[in-house]
Image (cartoon, rainbow, N blue to C red):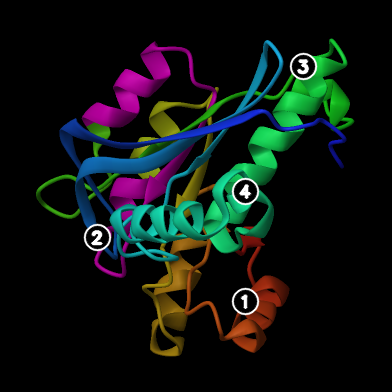
Amino acid sequence: MESTAQLHKARAWYIALPMARPFVSAKTAVSKRELILVALSSGTATGWGEAAPVAGHAGPPAHELWRQLVRLVDDHGLRAPAVSDGLLGAAHAQAYDDLSARLHGEPLWRALGGSNGVAASAAIGLDEDGRPDAGQLLSAVQEGYRWVKLKITPTTDRRTLGELIAAHPNVGIGLDANGSFTRADDALLGSIDDVGAAYIEQPGPAADLEWHAELRMKMRTPVALD
């Protein structure tokens, strides 16, 4: 979606929020959520976007993105959003699209051709023993989430996964390995295939597309890439 709005003001904030408890995955433990919030304004309308990398997963950390943004503003002023790339470029694109939708008097989901009936999904981290956090899962279900994603690793017990999924039959439960499995774990993935998960996301390294294609052919559980 291309915005034709004339930009009058651009603002940004670097935000670091301590989390109530660490969010643990196969790659990292996040105890502080860091992100950059951007606002682009035209007249009285303002559109919003964010660059919110997760430490240890993809892209430069938020504090490095903030340094990049400061340099861009120093060099380009109000044109900085137009020359940004990567996660900063994506954040500005979000804000431009939001601004354009607001100027046309419609919600962003409609301007993008989407639906407002999408159910929110919760991501559930690992507990201190490296298992999907059953307490977090129960809290998410009680709060009304009907789709959740459990973080897993090659040490995650297949029986534990089966019990968690069976305990919440009305909730779609996917698995996310964050690339922690290898080809040597084929048998383990085969056992996980029987637990009834809605899907398994990024079981192996992101670059090994051939193996993911093989897994997709032989597993009943859908294989997703992030």
Q: CA distance from mark 4 to mark 3?
A: 18 Å
Q: Is residue 221 left or right of residue 35?
A: right
* Residue 212, quarter of the rendered image: bottom right
Q: Residues within 10 Å of mark 3 (few under 14, many from 20)?
A: some
Residue 201: percent from the left, percent from the top?
53, 59
Q: Are marks 2 and 4 in contact (CB under 8 Å)?
A: no
Q: Which residues are magenta?
A: 135-161
Q: Is residue 86 left or right of residue 113?
A: left
* Figure check: 44 above or below 194: above
Disc number placed over residue 215 in the picture, else none: 1
Quick one: label 4 or label 1, which is nearer the N terminus? 4
Quick one: label 2 or label 4, which is nearer the N terminus? 2
Quick one: label 3 or label 2, which is nearer the N terminus? 2
The quadrant in which the N terminus is found is: top right
Instruction: Compare residues 161 and 46 and report the one nearer the observer.
Output: 46
Disc number placed over residue 28 in the picture, else none: 2
Q: Which residue is mark 3?
A: 102
Circle 4: element type: helix
Q: CA distance from mark 2 to mark 4?
A: 30 Å
Q: CA distance from mark 1 to mark 2?
A: 25 Å
Q: Which residue is mark 4?
A: 81
Quick one: label 4 or label 3, which is nearer the N terminus? 4
Q: Are marks 1 and 2 in contact (CB under 8 Å)?
A: no
Q: Amino acid at mark 3?
A: Arg
Number of the front mark, 4 or 1: 4
Number of the front mark, 3 or 1: 3
Quick one: label 3 or label 1, which is nearer the N terminus? 3
Quick one: label 1 or label 2, which is nearer the N terminus? 2
Q: CA distance from mark 3 to mark 2?
A: 37 Å
Number of the front mark, 4 or 3: 4
